[in-house]
Image (tube, rainbow, N blue to C red):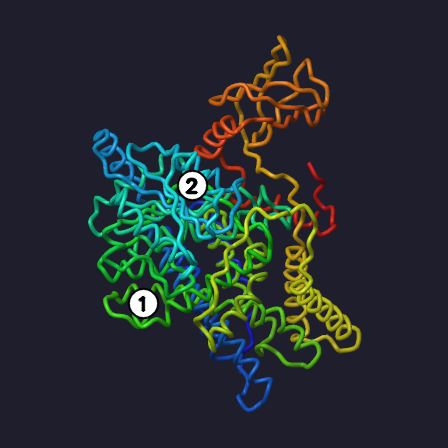
């Protein structure tokens, strides 16, 4: 039985929590280990306090039938999420920065001149078209390093790609079948390259990831540590993921994986437990060969690669630098399927006889970190349960847990407030309430179904390639997923309104009204995310604040670039402007004069479309993608993000700029 809450004590607790959270968020430095420890302990203790209260005072008698079952199921998944969060706080107390080691390694390599180890570059491709592949191939050939051998590993045996590789002067490899999907393709490249170039290090790139010019000088030097078998770098995207795009927050909300790449992997690296993420990594040929090649037993060969190397005494080192840029999943279905595959792969590796949970040769810390990663997926159903819980209360009187608003204010709200301050602080504004939940929520249903089916058939499923470069010119409503959230939203509204109009107001009703309001907001944002908005540009634009010149005949005009892409550019308005549709030439730095045609004129800008040949296009690729500037938000801008979300939802609270 819960004891009554002293109102003065409640206000003191909430005030102190708010004061400490604001103070730490404002004055503490997430780069300092002591600050991470203090703020993490503060947030973790509040969360642990809440968990102890939930365990001891909010659960019903087990004999109450379905009501008891529901309450205990909800509690179990909630505890999984809390254990995962507490473990994450512990992991993030430590953080490793490999950039000073990379600096020293680069200095040694550059001092050695051409006397440096060679690198084979594997570009693994399945069905990507030339518009995607050429960026990666041209950028790979432009890598600043003395000995680079580019290999295009074609798993769909395309003659046109073979001919293109011959014209580009890069190696081409194919195999008679697609056994073991990407891992099989990489192993085929491993075998064929050993017979020809046999470089001691291998850079692996997905077909849509363009390496930056300095990628190898930054990475190869880290192999001076003999324990290192693989060096992984983060994935950065030059297009908005479906959540950013559909919610209209490309410039104010980060892609869903930024926390994992920029914050969590450096922390895991401090524990020597960072892991491969499938592209933009360099692996030692000797280490991967001794391990038997890239593992084929899971649909996620990346994380499995780290663990087979770990058994051989090698670690994966994380270099947190932007050394490649690629395409994020462009549509919501591809986004969801990708996360379902990651979930399935994590479960498969856990079940393997030689995996990190059952196999020999692993440290205890290796096993604990893998278990921690599994909890990330196992906790996903909790998001769905949070939305369903108010519906059961309004229609059947079944509560997820039994408490009063005062008790929740005393135990639950401090934990939420503490973590809401800690999360954006520790991640450097890469988490944001509502947005963080929605990015997880839209994939939670598919991940939950994946886990359920994996309980019965964890292996034997085909590898699904994430489709890139498809036609995205139309609005696509994913009704199957959206209908789930729409139905929940209607049930929540109808149940809440009916109960308020017909029942006597009580503490439980007030508590569930607040819960319902939060669920409605999440449902609304999830419904919006289920509508893929058109992507009308064939090529993404990048900011390009450089001097521009354009000419028509003998007339030359100077201006400033605003942005640039492979197929065009925008420049500032000039005193003299060409006519719409007219031909002209644009001088692009490091590229030269590029034929173009005027597509749009306004009082502020001149927009042109390039009419370039292949050689000019390749120079543009080297300019744009080998030193790619940021064109997607890398930190959250809360006011702008919520304003854009409200506008997309139809509430013009913040007028467009």
Quickly name the residue at label 1.
356
Q: CA distance from mark 1 to mark 2?
A: 29 Å
Residue, far bottom: 63
Nearer to us in this view, 118 or 412: 118
- Residue 642 percent coordinates (x, y): 63, 49
Res 29 seen here: no
Give the crowd class for mark 1: few <14, some 14-19, many >=20 residues within 10 Å.
Answer: many
Give the crowd class for mark 2: few <14, some 14-19, many >=20 residues within 10 Å.
Answer: many
**Rendered residue at 37%/55% (across/down):** 92
**Rendered residue at 56%/22% (across/down):** 594
Residue, far top: 554
Check disc 2 and report its element: helix, strand or loop: strand
Residue 524: quarter of image: bottom right
Q: Quadrant of the C terminus?
A: top right
Q: Is residue 622 above or below residue 10?
A: above
Quickly name the residue at label 2.
324
Of the numbered discs 1 and 2, the one sitting upstream in the chain is 2
The label on residue 168 is none
């Amino acid at each position: 039985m819960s004891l009554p809450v002293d109102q003065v004590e409640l206000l003191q607790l909430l005030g102190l929590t708010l004061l400490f959270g604001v103070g730490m968020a404002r004055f503490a430095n997430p780069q300092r280990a002591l600050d991470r420890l203090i703020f993490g302990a503060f947030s973790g203790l509040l969360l642990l306090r809440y968990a102890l209260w939930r365990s001891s005072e909010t659960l019903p008698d087990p004999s109450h039938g379905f009501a008891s079952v529901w309450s205990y199921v909800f509690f179990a998944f909630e505890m999984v999420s809390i254990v995962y969060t507490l473990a994450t706080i512990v992991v993030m107390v430590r953080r490793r920065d490999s950039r000073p080691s990379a600096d020293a390694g680069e200095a040694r390599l550059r001092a050695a001149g051409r006397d440096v180890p060679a690198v084979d570059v594997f570009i693994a491709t399945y069905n990507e078209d030339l518009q995607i592949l050429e960026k990666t191939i041209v950028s790979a050939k432009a890598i600043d390093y003395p000995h680079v051998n580019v290999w295009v590993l074609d798993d769909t045996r395309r003659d046109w790609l073979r001919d293109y590789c011959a014209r580009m002067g890069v190696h081409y490899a194919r195999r008679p079948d697609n056994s073991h999907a990407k891992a099989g393709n990489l192993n085929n490249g491993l075998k064929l390259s050993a017979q020809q170039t046999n470089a001691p290090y291998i850079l692996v790139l997905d077909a849509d990831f363009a390496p930056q010019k300095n990628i190898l000088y930054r990475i190869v030097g880290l192999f001076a540590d003999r324990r290192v078998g693989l060096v992984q770098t983060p994935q950065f995207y030059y297009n908005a993921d479906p959540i950013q795009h559909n919610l209209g927050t490309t410039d104010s909300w980060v892609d869903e994986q930024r926390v994992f790449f920029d914050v969590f992997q450096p922390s895991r690296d401090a524990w020597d437990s960072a892991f491969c993420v499938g592209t933009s990594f360099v692996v030692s040929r000797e280490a991967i060969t001794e391990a038997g090649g890239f593992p084929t037993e899971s649909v996620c060969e990346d994380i499995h690669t780290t663990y087979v190397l770990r058994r051989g005494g090698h670690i994966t080192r994380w270099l947190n630098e932007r050394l490649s840029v690629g395409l994020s999943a462009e549509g919501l279905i591809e986004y969801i399927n990708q996360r379902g595959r990651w979930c399935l792969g994590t479960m498969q590796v856990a079940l393997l006889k030689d995996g990190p949970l059952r196999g020999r040769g692993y440290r205890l810390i290796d096993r604990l970190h893998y278990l921690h990663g599994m909890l990330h997926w196992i906790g996903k159903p909790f998001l769905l349960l949070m939305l369903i819980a108010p519906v059961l209360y309004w229609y059947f009187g079944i509560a997820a847990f039994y408490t009063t608003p005062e008790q929740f204010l005393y135990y639950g709200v401090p934990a939420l407030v503490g973590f809401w301050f800690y999360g954006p602080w520790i991640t450097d504004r890469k988490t944001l309430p509502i947005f963080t939940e929605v990015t997880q929520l839209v994939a939670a249903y598919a991940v939950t179904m994946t886990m359920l089916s994996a309980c019965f058939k964890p292996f034997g499923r085909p590898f699904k390639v994430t489709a890139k470069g498809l036609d995205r010119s139309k609005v696509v409503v994913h009704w199957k997923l959206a209908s789930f959230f729409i139905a929940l939203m209607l049930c929540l509204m109808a149940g809440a309104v009916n109960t308020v109009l017909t029942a006597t107001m009580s503490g439980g009703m007030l508590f569930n009204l607040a819960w319902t309001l939060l669920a409605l907001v999440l449902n609304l944002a999830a419904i919006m995310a289920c509508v893929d908005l058109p992507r009308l540009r064939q090529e993404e634009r990048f900011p390009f604040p450089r001097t521009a010149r354009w000419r028509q005949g003998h007339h030359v005009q100077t201006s400033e670039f605003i942005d640039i892409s492979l197929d065009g550019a925008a420049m500032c308005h000039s005193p003299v402007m060409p006519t719409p549709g007219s031909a002209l030439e644009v001088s692009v730095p490091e590229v030269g004069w590029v034929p173009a045609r005027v597509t749009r004129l306004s009082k502020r800008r001149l927009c042109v479309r390039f009419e370039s040949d292949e050689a000019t296009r390749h120079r543009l690729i080297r300019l744009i993608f080998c030193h790619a500037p940021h064109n997607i938000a890398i930190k959250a801008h809360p006011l702008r993000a919520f304003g854009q979300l409200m506008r997309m939802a139809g509430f013009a609270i913040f007028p467009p700029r």
